[in-house]
Amino acid sequence: MKRVLAATGALGLALALSACASEDSETTTSMTETDTTTEVTTSETTTSETTTEETATETTTTMAGEGEDIVDTAVAAGQFTTLTTALQEAGLVETLKGDGPFTVFAPTDEAFAALPEGTLDTLLADPSGDLTEILTYHVIPDEVFAADVVELDGQTVDTVQGGSLTVNVDGENVSLTDEAGNTVNVIDTDIEASNGVIHVIDGVLMPTL
């Protein structure tokens, strides 16, 4: 009889252990399913964030591609304060905000400062006279990039003023000779605007006045 009770007890213990193991298995399975669901949710969230970032990038690129006109671009550059002031005095701002396209050889503030003493003041005092002639002499009524300029060695290009400039190419160095015989260097190129392009020069070009 004791053996029967012992066997019965052992069987009960085995069934109990089996039941516990089954519950543990179900709990483990439930936890695994929960973890899997969490991973899927996290993956979907990450994908959503990536899509949002891509959209933001596309928007930024579009805005950057819109550009500003030549006058606004020159103002933003910060090194053409004298040039933009002269354009305002000569009433040429609206012209250079037009459809274009234009190519502007833009003298820096240092280039204007290097003019003989009193020259700039005299020009600004009579903006509808020589100042307008000089400023329009720096503008070509077309869009000419650096890659185009280097193909023009020894050739002349016509300006809005009516005069011409001679292009000089020496390896990677490009310079312009004006009608007064002065030569200035092109020190930066291809500053793009919505209605043309700006090339930076280190001197002021002078037409025949």
Image (tube, helix red, strand yellow):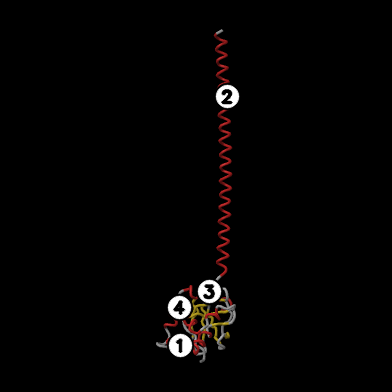
From the viewer's side, name the closer residue of 65 and 181: 65
Res. 155 visible in picture: no
Q: Which mark is residue 123?
A: 1
Label 1 close to label 3 by CB (< 8 Å): no
Give the farthest residue toward the top. 1
Q: Which mark is residue 81?
A: 4
- Which of pointers 3 and 4 indicates the residue nearer the eye? 4
Q: Which mark is residue 191?
A: 3
Q: Is residue 51 left or right of residue 203?
A: right
Give the farthest residue toward the left. 117
Please tell me which residue is depicted at 45% across the width and 86% down the height of the picture.
124
Name the residue that disc number 2 marks: 19
Mark 2 to mark 1 CA distance (whole Å) = 102 Å
- Which of pointers 2 and 3 indicates the residue nearer the eye? 2
Of the two numbered discs 3 and 4 on the same chain, state the one appearing first in sequence. Answer: 4
Q: Which mark is residue 25?
A: none
Res. 70 visible in picture: yes
Crowding at mark 1 (Cα within 10 Å: few <14, some 14-19, many 20+): some
Of the two numbered discs 1 and 3 on the same chain, state the one appearing first in sequence. Answer: 1
Mark 1 to mark 3 CA distance (whole Å) = 27 Å
Q: Quadrant of residue 9?
A: top right
Label 2 close to label 1 by CB (< 8 Å): no
Crowding at mark 2 (Cα within 10 Å: few <14, some 14-19, many 20+): few
Mark 4 to mark 2 CA distance (whole Å) = 87 Å
What secondary structure is marked by label 2? helix
Of the two numbered discs 4 and 1 on the same chain, state the one appearing first in sequence. Answer: 4
Where does the image place residue 20, in percent across and percent down from the top left? Answer: 55, 25
Mark 4 to mark 1 CA distance (whole Å) = 16 Å
From the viewer's side, name the closer residue of 86 and 180: 86
Please tell me which residue is depicted at 57% across the width and 38% down the height of the picture.
34
Q: Is residue 203 above or below residue 34?
A: below
